[in-house]
Amino acid sequence: MATPVWLPGMDITAERLDAMQQAASLLVTNYGADPSGTANANPGIQEALNIARDLGGAQVVVPPGVYLIGATLRIYGNTRLSLMAGAEFRRNVAGTMIINGDAGQAFGGYTGHSNIVIEGGLWNMRGTTAGLTASAMCISIGHATDITVQDLEVRDLPGFHAIEMNSTTHGVIRNCKFRGYVDPGGRDFSEAVQIDLAKSSGVFGGFGPYDHTACEDVLVTGCHFGASGTAGTTAWPRGVGSHSATITKYHRRIRVIGNSFEGVLQYGVSAYNWEDAAVAANTFVSCGSGVRLRTVIVADTEDTKLPDGTQTSASQSMRNLAVVGNTFRSGAGYDEPIVALGETTGQVLNLTIAGNSIDGSTTAQNGIRLQEVERSSVTGNAIANSAGTGLSMENCARVIADANQITWAGTHGITAVTCTQMTVSANQVMFPDQNGVLVQGGSDIQVRGNFVKGPGRVTNATYYAFRISTAASSISLSGNKCRGFGSGNEAINGLSVTNTCTLIQRYGNDWRGSWTGANLDDLSTTPNTTATDLS
């Protein structure tokens, strides 16, 4: 890489001043780039980018106009590529629009072409145009540090990704628009912004080495993901996410904050094999799903390999994740608005889901679903009109579900199925179609201070305000309250405990209501109903 024009401590010579003046005025039109949209402009643009490289860094400016890009552009270290308002890069090559470096380069880790800013303009991928419908990338970044992509729009991309940050640290993507996608076949899972690792040429085709370097410290903020309205295109399948993994590697400190996802077909955010990550203050409207947190999928035999290719046939845990203060409306039914899925060989650990607002899911999707999650809290969320359960937890351990408000759930309010060491406290469950709180199997669960109103709305004399069943053991119920709806379909009991359950402790609850059966039906073996210490 060439020596920069000037760095602090260098002498300011006439030669360096002249070079700096040149570097400040690299207008691509001065190098023959045609702004009329009638001839390929990439030779002139590339010449300006090459001069910036040779100077050791410069700003390359693209004036208003339409620039046909007939070959992949190469951007190098210490370069700022600025498209002015009214400038459009119009793809005219069946390939990537721009990449940071040359094919065949071999900078490992984060040592490739870095300190790059790409900003402004419309990047028109023309994915429905004859000859341009095969999968292609718009902006491809690998083996880099200090990368900023901002204030631009990527439109109508076929197959691959608008921005791929692969093997990149300290990346920022802000105030961008990702609108319009074309699936050329078999690419219904593509992300507009992909966070990926240098796993193989099939994962990142630009250049190697394939040393499994992952991404770290990436921020995506202030962006919009959705449809363009161009005939033959859809909204993006996924907004921000990953779909490749290597055992022992993680994408770390990924932050997705303050973005808008509209009509995204699958996941707004798919945090696959991420750690120390936050998804906060985003808005999801009419998306197939909002946020997925997923450990390595055991069934994917490529993702369960070590860097040396050894097959582990196992997942790995991922930890320290926060989904906070997001808004979800009119979920489209691909998956839950918030879903955290681990595997028996790799759990989701240290997860916080707090202060989210969820209004609507379809086709039996729950509001929030946790599976194989440990050491986590779900607190202060407002969940309304879920087609399935408001808050569903299965095979989870050491989870606190506290102070959530769940209204008009299509099945149950809260479920804990084969869970252990869990606290369900201070939740309000209003008008669920089926049970209010269902504990099915599991052990060492505290159900405290919850209020259930109007359970069993879908079918009369079938469901319960609180239901403990399927050999659940060591369940404590205290300070809970329930009431019937008062008309129409009603639940059978305020509390129902089946005869397979053991070590039930209950006291200070109010099971009264307009039930079709008794207020209390506890068939468990010798339940303890005193408020004294047990020893």
Image: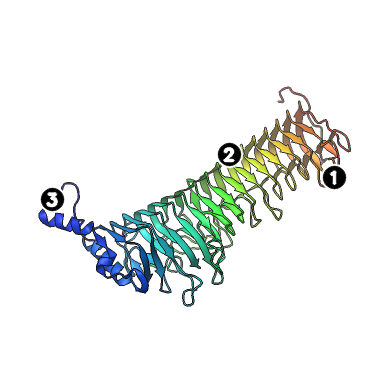
The kind of residue tagged 1 is: Thr
Q: Quadrant of the C terminus?
A: top right
> Farthest left residue?
14
Residue 479 image point, x, y percent: 73, 28
Residue at left offset 63%, top offset 42%: 397
| Labels 2 and 1: the sequence-earlier one | 2
Q: Earlier in the sequence, mark 1 or mark 3?
A: 3
Label 1: few (<14), some (14–19) or many (≥20) C-alpha neighbours in 10 Å: some
Residue linked to disc 1: 462
Query: In whole angstroms, how far apart are the C-alphas of marks 3 and 2?
Result: 54 Å
Give the mark toward the camera: 2 or 1: 2
Residue 449 x, y percent position in the rendering:
70, 30
Asked if residue 371 is positioned above or below residue 48 in the image, the reply reads above
Indicate the quadrant containing the N terminus: top left, top right, bottom left or bottom right. Answer: bottom left
Q: Is residue 53 left or right of residue 512?
A: left
The residue singled out by tag 2 in the image is 355
Residue 215: x and y in percent read: 42, 54
What is the secondary structure assignment of the residue under circle 1?
loop
What is the distance, in whole Å, between disc 2 and disc 1 at their CAs? 32 Å
Residue at image position (64%, 57%) is 334
Numbered disc 3: secondary structure: loop
Circle 2 — which element? loop
Q: Check the image and report above or below for 508 versus 14.
A: above
Residue found farthest to the top: 532
Type of the residue with mark 3: Ile
- Out of 103 and 106, give the one closest to the viewer: 103
Q: Nearer the viewer, residue 228 or 361?
A: 228
Rounded to the nearest whole Å, what is the CA distance between mark 1 and mark 3?
Answer: 85 Å
* Marks 3 and 2 close (CB-CB < 8 Å): no
The disc label shown at residue 12, or none: 3
- The image quadrant that residue 529 belongs to is top right
Left or right: where does residue 370 sit relative to residue 24?
right
